[in-house]
Image: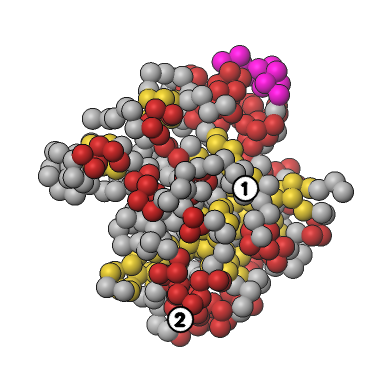
Amino acid sequence: MIMIQKILDLHIHSKYSRACSRDLELPNIAAGCVRKGIDIVSTGDFTHPKWFEHIKESLVEDGEGVYRLMTYDVGRMTDRVRFILGTELSCIKKHKGETRRLHLCVFAPNIEAVEKFNNKLEEMGFNLKSDGRPILGLTAKQLLEIMLEVDKRMVLIPAHAWTPWFGIFGSKGGYDSLEDCFEELTPHVFAIETGLSSDPAMNWRCSVLDKIALISNSDAHSCAKLGREANVMEFESEKDITYNSIINKIKNQQIKYTIEFFPEEGKYHFDGHRDCKFVCHPKETRRLGGICPKCKKPLVIGVMNRVEELADKDVDGNGVVPYKSLVPLPEIIADVFEVGASSKKVKGAYEDLIKKLGNEFYILIDAKLSEIEKASSKEISDAIDRVRHGDIFVQPGYDGEFGVVKVFGEKLKREKIRQGTLLLD
């Protein structure tokens, strides 16, 4: 049987979330998905009253629990994009002696379930108008209890699980296992989002995650950031694409592969202090006793260090779901031109490539190098080839500062970074 392949980004935001672009409205999100090559995307932020109204006014059901734009622009091909109902919630409450701050992805099977869920939260006194990602004075387990009471088909997936401040395994008040957090409800949590600062291979080192699905999403705060991480799934037909089928594929780890950031580019990969401009590998952190040599305060412990702390095995290369690490196309073009990714020159070259070859994921993953060279230049074709083979240089991110990836240049080689043989000062 010939299967159809779809790319899914299941964690984004709307214009009602803090520090998010005002352009994040559903028609613009759909157009951004077309350019990137995303087929199915989360609505994001469904607890916000104004955004939920926008969802109800803009979308129509097109398969069980899957929606499309009610009116769309044929020229922009936005009729092809499907939405599922999802959001991110921030739970902050003391639990087991520590204040836990967790970001959690929540999914609902239909509009009716979202309405009932939102009403329940409002009845409990939570201010859903405050932000697209509201803060709830609940433990993650309490939130899950409410969800299951509203509709047993609702799903909770911990967001960016390893980030220091709001990850379920983060160094700042996270847990050491899902069981510590969810207790008897743990069987309802069958997946985590790995986040930009970790990749599947890092997660494979933790046996507590052996039976847990690993998904990857963009957490986009603008249309330009859509799809910086994503999931690739296969379906028998368009009619087979439903809320239940998507959730079941995640639950059963039936993901063809995930699309990943190089984790070093994530803004919490290494340890450090942004204000002090100090960053180091976990090995150096241990030598320093966890103290910043500049300000003498504790370092912010990043994802690589936290994974090392919880890891109990080596990577054996037998992960359940494979993955591909990419660098966004504008960053690749910018590196070739030696200018900023938001420059007019990069934007022009990006638009030209998309117009000639198709969406960004096709160019980064599937297009023949000869096609790319013909549509652009030998330098851009060579750069994409190097990214496909992981032959890049990187300055790792730390303490909220994104890493800097260079396809060409004299930066630190990825494998040496991972081995800890080179340290930044």
**Residue 294 in the figure: left or right of residue 232:** left
* Residue 130 visible in the current orientation: no
Residue range in magenta is 368-380
Label 2 or label 1, whichever comes before in sequence order: 2
Quarter of the view holding residue 246: bottom right
Q: Quadrant of the C terminus?
A: top left
**Residue 269 drawn at (x, y percent):** 37, 42
Instruction: Tell me the amino acid under the disc marked 1.
Output: Val
On whether residue 224 falls in the magenta region, the answer is no
The residue carrying mark 2 is: 122
Comparing marks 2 and 1, which lies closer to the viewer?
Answer: 1
Left or right: 64 in relation to 134: right
* Contact check, label 2 and label 1, Cβ < 8 Å: no
For label 1, the residue is 321
Residue 415: percent from left, percent from top:
44, 29
Residue 412 image position (x, y, % from top left): 37, 25
Q: Secondary structure at mark 1?
A: loop
Closer to the camera in the image, 93 or 88: 93
- Magenta-drawn stretch, dominant element (helix, strand or loop): helix
